[in-house]
Amino acid sequence: MKTVLVYRDRLLPPSEQAFMRRQYMGFRTLRPCWVGCRRDAPAPDLPGDVRFLGGSGPLRPLRQMAFRQFGWGAAREVADLAPVLVHAQFGRGGALALSIARALGVPLVVTFHGGDAFKDRHYAGGFPPSVFQRRWQALQSHAALFVCVSEGVRDRLLERGVPARLLEVIPIGAEPAPLAAGPADRFVFAGRFVDKKGVPVLIDAVRILAGRGVTPPVVLAGDGPLLPAMRDRAAGLANLRFAGWLGAADLAAEMDRAIALLVPSVVPPGGDREGLPSVAVEAMARGVPVVASSQSGLEGAVGHAGAGIVVPAGDPMALADAMQAMLVPRTRDAMAGAAAATARESFCAPVQSARLEARLLSLLPGATG
């Protein structure tokens, strides 16, 4: 097998481990080797080897700084792997990995996941400029391909002036999963408690439903900087439960009993927004319909396919109405079937992973087709 370096500076936030692993699960010719500078906890369960840059000893932080700021040294640390291509995760990862690909003389591919395309601060001028800002033009000139996880990400990069020839949409998808066993008796939210997730809209919608005498259980799984404020906002809502961060098995157990997954995303100041929420694709693979906002990145996958309901972003009344509509079993069951079919036909992770590998192989010297 041929080695592809997968660059992610931080290896690997728990929230990323599942969908990062799925991106490579269909590889048969390329062997991933993960490269970064910072070790996260717990240790990532990833296909392929993991290597941290900077060596060991007291000079390691200095060597890592020299790599990040000036692109020095890292290529020597991975040359023994004889990689044929570098695949960087996120735009900043592409800027950091640029020096490695150049020094090794191999193609560079960057996957943009959402915030790295949407957040205005990544592209705004400032002093001192960030590594990404300093290398953005060089990254476009050198990279062979920018992989976009959704059409929305592609459209935003086009608006930022990236040539269309450089952009290709390849969703990550979800693994085939058994359909939710039920009984469907709760709504579920799963994600980080950050501005773009729209948790205040969800809580306000639950309060509106409570005012109507409608109090289905609502489970909010996840953590993040806004969690304390959201607990305060939800005071008095006895049917709403904060479950904390859940592992894959525990989250799957919640999904098994979900009436629908709630994705009430908004666009906060600064432009950040969703790319393709992986948890929504995972839910659909289990036959769980989705109630998503118009800024969730799911408008096409959910609304057009009948796999759920799309509501205006930032509108708690519309979200409450959609949740109440989902309580009608016949309505919910029809959407559940459409969700499973959409996931199977458009977001099958092994298929999307094989697509990615084929595209990477097509960029190698001497490739045909």
Image (tube, grey):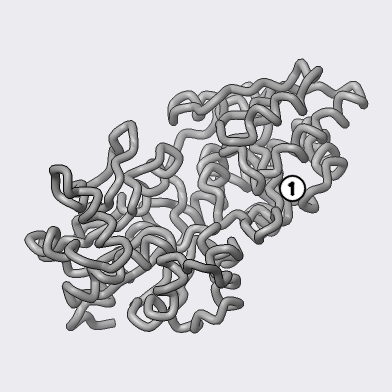
Based on the displayed image, in which of its 4 quarters is residue 186 positioned? top right
Q: Is residue 32 visible?
A: no
Q: Is residue 144 above or below residue 345?
A: below
Q: Residue furthest left?
A: 80
The residue under label 1 is 309
Q: Is residue 272 visible?
A: yes
For the residue pair 259 and 194, the one nearer the viewer reads as 194
For the residue pair 282 and 121, the one nearer the viewer reads as 121
Residue drawn where x is 60% and y is 25% of the image: 257
In the displayed structure image, the side of residue 71 where residue 90 appears, left or right: right
Find residue 119 and report its horizontal and vertical position in percent: 59, 61
Q: Is residue 149 above or below residue 240?
A: below
Q: Is residue 197 above or below residue 296?
A: above
For the residue pair 25 and 246, the one nearer the viewer reads as 246
> Regarding mark 1 in the picture, which secondary structure is present there?
strand
Find residue 369 and report its horizontal and vertical position in percent: 29, 82
Residue drawn where x is 53% and y is 42% of the image: 279
Residue drawn where x is 50% and y is 29% of the image: 252
